[in-house]
Image: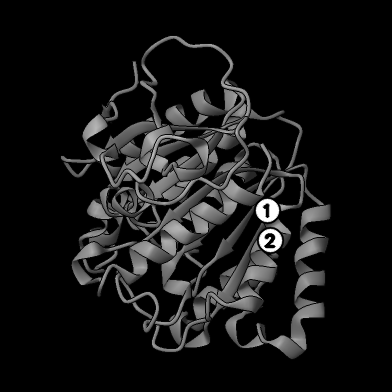
Amino acid sequence: MIVRYQSPSAENWQGRVDGTIPACRRWHQVMQLLDLNDAGTDLGASFVLLGFACDEGVRRNQGRPGAVQGPAAIRSVLKNLPVHHAPAVMLYDAGDITCEDGNLEAAQEALATAVHIILKRNAFPLILGGGHEVTYGHFKGSRKAGNANDTTGIINFDAHFDLREPVGALGNSGTGFYQIAKDLEQQQRPFAYLPVGIRRISNTQQLFQTAAGLKVPFIEAEAIYAGNMEPVQRTIQEFIDNVQRLCLTIDLDVFAASVAPGVSAPAFNGISPGHCFQQLFQQVLRSGKLVSFDIAELNPAFDIDHRTAKLAADLIFRLVSDHGC
């Protein structure tokens, strides 16, 4: 049994009905509920939503609490999206991992267990955060489900490195990738990490030094513009070519505050979710190596007109519509 687990609710999938024929359907009409504590068979070509209702890592990192409501806010937008994915692709909601007592480490372990179960049933986990502490549990579960000798890479669209060293062995929303690096070091496996959208104003010199010490390549936000896409895409492709499996995480604070105000740490001059970003996003989606995805740091308490929740839903919609299982 998965601890800290809340099974999915049909109440989250009630919405507008334009008709029942396939051309009229919306996500709430095709979404199926999946209890991960029930024994099950191969899920085949399917995407499984799994919430990580937690902002304990944000609180520990002295950020703005509220990301615990992120999964619910994303579902509230997803439910009315039109169905554009192939008929053979199934959508499941598997409920939430919770962290109601401040025990972030136990919640991350529960998330890792849930992600592992989804992948072992040959489905694609779509993890809804939650603070960016979500990726530590996400990665642990994804790596456990793969071949131990494979290199699992992580591409992180983020304004921050999130390579802080935990204080007193307690992680937070800014330590996840450092924790992954140390876990892999103990396992004598390479740390393959590519942050995209890094902003110097959002990271101390120490974090750049830590990245250099861990041999982490990175792409700065200022490099992502129409006239510079070839070298940016080449860097991403070289990274993809050197791993066997790929996890993707998008921290919504990588985007400008005008389009993503509802985050724990808004960036007044982050990247645009427009054409240049979409080129990079599609490059990752169509790599043939992507096995799991999380979206982090949606904080509905600070959102405006649901802009950030709608952006998160748009990213998930594009992945489901364009990415084959």
What kind of residue is marked 1? Leu
Which element is circle 1 on?
helix
- Front position in the image: 272 or 213: 272
Residue plotted at (57% across, 77% down)? 274
- Front position in the image: 259 or 88: 88
Residue 23 locus on image (x, y percent): 52, 43
Which element is circle 2 on?
helix
| Location of the N terminus (image quadrant) | top left
What kind of residue is marked 2? Gln
Question: Does 33 appear above or below 254?
Answer: above
User: Mark 1 = which residue?
Assistant: 285
Residue 115 locus on image (x, y percent): 49, 32
| Location of the C terminus (image quadrant) | top right
| Quadrant housing residue 37 | top left
> How far separated are the C-alphas under marks 1 and 2?
5 Å
Q: Are the residues tagged 1 and 2 within 8 Å (C-beta)?
A: yes
User: Mark 2 = which residue?
Assistant: 282
Residue plotted at (59% across, 43% down)? 85
